[in-house]
Amino acid sequence: LVFSEADTAVKIDGEGLKGSIRWLVPDAQKNRMEPILVEIGPGGETPEDDPHEGEEFGYVLSGSVQIVLGDHSAKARKDESFCFEPTAVHKLTNPGKTAARVLWVATPPSF
């Protein structure tokens, strides 16, 4: 029901992401959603994710991100959220000069 920082898993990526991904719920693959905390460094981007069933939701905790969904993109800033059906290849990028932190939830989990 409640998970601490010790329960989470973290992947640090100094290459494309220039930041980290923290899986907030242990064994999320058995659940219907996958909440992660993503930190994207300036000029970084998440790996591209293929189209899949479900929905994606994000809330920008700091900085700003560009949401890229196929040929479309939109910018979300601190305290803004986004929600979309992942019908095309998608990713988040950080074109800014400071790190961006995003709470990102996908259904179903995509591992």
Image (cartoon, rainbow, N blue to C red):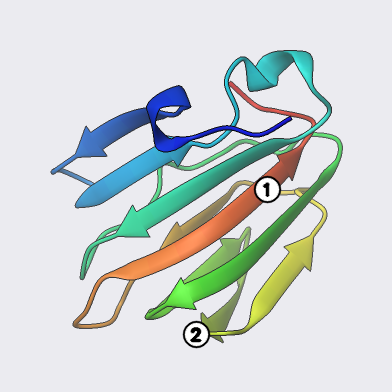
In the displayed structure, 93 sits above or below 17; it is below
Q: Which residue in the structure is indicated by mark 2?
A: 78
Picture quadrant of residue 26: top right
In the image, which disc is placed on residue 6? none
Please tell me which residue is depicted at 79% across the width and 31% down the height of the picture: 108
Describe residue 76's horizontal placement relative to residue 106 as left or right: left
Please tell me which residue is depicted at 76% across the width and 13% down the height of the picture: 30
Horizontal and vertical percent for residue 58? Answer: 64, 62
* Residue at disc 2, secondary structure: loop
Can residue 17 be seen here? The reply is no
> Which amino acid does the dot numbered 2 rest on?
Lys
> Is disc 1 surrounded by few (<14), some (14 to 19) or many (20+) residues within 10 Å?
some
Horizontal and vertical percent for residue 37? Answer: 48, 49
> Is disc 2 surrounded by few (<14), some (14 to 19) or many (20+) residues within 10 Å?
some
Horizontal and vertical percent for residue 77? Answer: 50, 86
Please tell me which residue is depicted at 63% across the width and 58% down the height of the picture: 70
* Residue at disc 1, secondary structure: strand
User: In which quadrant of the rendered image does the C terminus lie?
Assistant: top right
In the displayed structure, 94 sits above or below 70; it is below
Q: Which residue in the structure is indicated by mark 1?
A: 105
